[in-house]
Amino acid sequence: MPGPGTSLPPNIITDKKTVAAMVRIYCHDHHGTFRRTLCEACAGLLEYADDRLDKCPFEEEKTTCRDCPIHCYRAAERATMKDVMRYAGPRMLLKHPLLAIRHLWMERKGAPPWPPVRRRRSR
């Protein structure tokens, strides 16, 4: 998590909103939760995803995680998130069209530049 006085880049904040919307759609349809609530497993997954986004070394250069050269998710969470995105992705166009279109646009940009921003700054 960023330290005091630092804030997250806007693209990371938007990615957090996109992931949260996808997890809510998945949880509602698969676990029968209400609109703004999540089951314990999905709440844990969302918290894990938020933590990973907080620590993304690409910062403002971050695109989507699909083509990222760094796989920062553990294997189990990565597999679960793939299931969530595979299910919720097409439904995002109806429920959250702006987030969905932005996500598709960012995906077209491809992988972020290597090395990450943080590594370039420390040299």
Image (cartoon, helix red, strand yellow):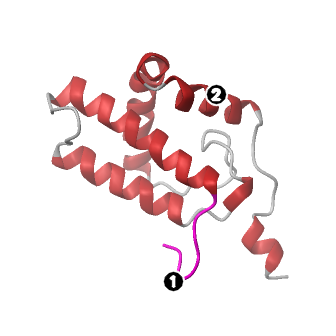
Q: Secondary structure at mark 2?
A: helix
- What residue do we see at 80% from left, 63% from top? 115
Say which amino acid is labelled 1: Pro
Question: Is residue 38 inside the magenta stretch?
Answer: no
Q: Does label 1 or label 2 sit earlier along the sequence?
A: 1
Q: CA distance from mark 1 to mark 2?
A: 32 Å
Q: Quadrant of residue 110?
A: top right
The quadrant the C terminus occupies is bottom right
- What residue do we see at 62% from left, 54% from top? 10
Say which amino acid is labelled 2: Leu
Select label 1 or label 2 by which is in front. Answer: 1
Q: Is residue 64 left or right of residue 113?
A: left
Residue bounds of the magenta highlight: 1-9
Residue 112 percent location from the top left of the image:
76, 49
The residue pinned by badge 1 equals 4
The residue pinned by badge 2 equals 104
Residue 65 percent location from the top left of the image:
60, 44
Q: Residues within 10 Å of mark 2 (few under 14, many from 20)?
A: few
* Above/below status of 17 relative to 56: above
Q: Is residue 70 left or right of residue 25?
A: right
Quick one: 6 or 110, which is closer to the camera? 6
Q: Quadrant of residue 37?
A: top left
Residue 13 percent location from the top left of the image:
54, 53
Residue 7 percent location from the top left of the image:
57, 70
